[in-house]
Amino acid sequence: MKPPFASTRPTLVQRLRLALAAAILALPTLAAAQSAGAVAGTVTAAENAAPVAGAVVTVEGTSLGVPTDARGRFRIARLVPGGYTLTVAAMGREPSRRAVQVAAGETAAADFALAPGSVLLSGLVVTANRTPTLARRVTATVNVLAHEQVERSPARTVDDLVRELPGVELPRTSGSVAGNAQIVSIRGMDEGRTLVLLDRVPLNDPWGEWVDWQRAPVYGIDRVELTEGGGSSLYGNYAMGGVIQLVSRPMAPHTAQGTFSAGSRGLREASVFGSDVAGRLAFAVDGTLADGGGYVAVAPGQRGAIDVDNSSTRRNAGLRAEYALRSDRTVSARVSVLDEDRSGGTELTPMSRRIGAAALGASLGGVAGGRVDADLFGTLQREVSHQAVAGAGRATETPAMLQSIPARDLGGSVQWARDAVGPVQLSAGGDFRWMHGTLDEDVYDGAGALARTTASGGSQVVGGAFVQGVLTPAAPLRIEASLRGDVWHNYAGRRAVSDSAAATTFDARTDRSLSPRLGVRVQAARGFAVRGSVFRAFRAPSLSEQYRSFISGNTRFLPNPDLGPEHLSGADLGFDWQPAGPVELRVTGFANRMRGLTDFEFLKPGYLMRQNLGKAHSRGVEAEAAVTAAEWLRLSATYNYDDAKTEAGARVHRVPLNRYVARAQLGTARVGELTAIYRHEGPSLSLSAAPLKAYDVVDATLRRELPAGATLFAAVENLTGTDYLVDQTGPLSRVGLPRTFRLGLTWVRR
């Protein structure tokens, strides 16, 4: 039986596709060749002058960069004459920065000798202070998945990639087969309380604050940064639990990469990336086409005739361009489209999503003794989902609801950061985001006939400003202080029902929040540092929480337009220890208290509604360890314990009690390299408060370099074929991803 309704694609995505194709064809002619220079050099190990392959050399203030080759060599060509600062980062090495002067028609030399350094805190991070800072110097708890780790991960999607990070809690279902968007939690904060950025622009969608991980294909990511703890003092709304930032791979002249793979249950995926530089203009294009790989998610003992694979078909395309006004000033633009169709697990529950996004940016050096970074972004999207009620024995199903959710946003940010003057570094800025969305529903009766239509939604605007000071009065001591004020305003809320004479309107609401943070780091001894911070943070209720209802199994989840904001007060304290030798250890304890926590509460059997449930706490500890036994053998592990409960003693939904991850990397790419990841997730509660037992899975990738820039790889997810629950709604159980094999080839030209 086919659905008795159909959705149409918005013309927006069609227009964006045409514009994107035209822009790609036109880019090479937009900038005539100009007299340019280059910089080239070699990256070696300081202790023995051995070449460091795979180190990433980037040009600060731009999106330009290249990895070093097997001999440690690099070359960045077509640079506008002027002064630049190069940054080199490699896993397990101290990062290095160097100023170079590039002249027209000449190649400047820049060689780097990198000392042994940290695996857990390698390179520079931008997210913690909104400015580039050595990861081992910030006062916050930060973690990085470096370029090397991203490249070798068996993950097919970015959400599966970030499962390795300590403190991060995601739904048990993989993003490759889950619903249209995913949640993410840090330190027991549950959904909607973590800000996710792609190159400074939010990936949290304007309707539900969910994260559209599929908008950032894993093959286009260079590294992932995580900052744990309340981030509202710099980022405002969404950052109550912390901030995850995805950094796109750098652009370089004459670069092309293609990855093609196939695997279990009809899995097929093809991704391409290319970049070049034409005069002052650098640009990159990427695209992904993926389908198959789904499975029947309903537990084997409960499956019926209606259950089918939850497979998906995904099409991504993106274009980035950057124009150099001069050596220290650039302007940029970005457009992307995501076109996705999914099966909801039965024939009558298909889903679709069309998203078009665009952003403009500027990075201007030499402004009042510092640098100004500014972004303007917008998103248009439409999500369509069909929901149904299963009959006895899941032998039949009846249409229950068709939902269409058009949403859009417009936002921007600007910040100024002054270069350090003596022991003081200052930065200040602000941002805003306007969001609007509606939920259009066709509701069907028990016989599958249209009973009524509803339309509900509203608008929300959130904005704020911050100031930050970093003080280093003495070499061992670093103090970070930041303060931000935010205002959010809900308006134009309404709900109209076809069988009601008048629409219901909801009062406009305005609220404010002040978010301070103070952090301190003391380098107590060589290789040993103590860090800690105290902070306050907040989150405004999303449009979805106020206006969207949905069905899971035969349970209905209801919205609440009267929800208020959530507030958090928290602190953390930890140490970083790297004694002489290949061993590292980090331990952090944290404690958070929340007011006005939003979660679902039963109204009556079969019906739950979002409520501000009062107070809650999240207390726990995180530990990380790494051992570099040799260049061909690296081991690391993380452990999380998170006691997240409401004041009534109930556990916060979807937050596991404990979680640990172990990673082993063995061999070299030329001979053969194995990466194995073991994950354990402790007991937790589903969205409807049903208990979920602990489980363990192993993922692995085997890679080997071939001639002519090719790499052959084989990957497996859930190697041991573990059966585990990912959700429990009433009597209905859903299971996780079964063993999934994938074989592929990557080809790179530089």
Image (cartoon, rainbow, N blue to C red):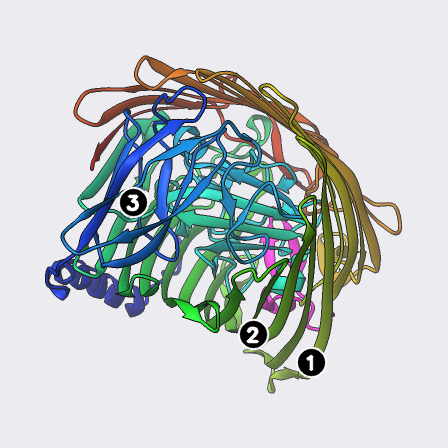
Q: Which residues are magenta?
A: 541-564
Give the spatial CA distance, label 1 vs label 3.
41 Å
Q: Position of residue 542 (x, y in %)?
A: 61, 66
Q: Position of residue 184 (x, y in %)?
A: 59, 48
How packed mark 1 is, by other alpha carbons closer than 10 Å (few <14, some 14-19, many 20 or more), is: some
Instruction: Read off the residue under disc 2.
Output: 457
| Identity of the residue furthest to the bottom in this view | 502
Secondary structure category for the residue under label 3: strand
Q: Where 662 falls versus 149 (above or below)?
A: above
Instruction: Read off the residue under disc 3.
Output: 288
- 550 magenta-colored: yes
**Foreground residue among 56 and 570:** 56
- The image quadrant that residue 135 belongs to is top right
Q: Residue at x 63, y 79 (%)?
A: 489
Secondary structure category for the residue under label 1: strand
| Amino acid identity at mark 1 | Thr
Give the spatial CA distance, label 2 vs label 3.
33 Å
Q: Residue at x 66, y 23 (%)?
A: 579
Q: Position of residue 106 (x, y in %)?
A: 16, 49
* Label located before the other in sequence (2 or 1): 2
| Amino acid identity at mark 3 | Thr
Q: Residue at x 77, y 59 (%)?
A: 568
How packed mark 3 is, by other alpha carbons closer than 10 Å (few <14, some 14-19, many 20 or more), is: many
Do callouts 2 and 1 mark residues in contact (Cβ within 8 Å)? no
Q: Which mark is residue 373?
A: none
Determine whether, in the image, residue 69 is placed left or right of residue 413.
left
Q: Position of residue 370 (x, y in %)?
A: 48, 67
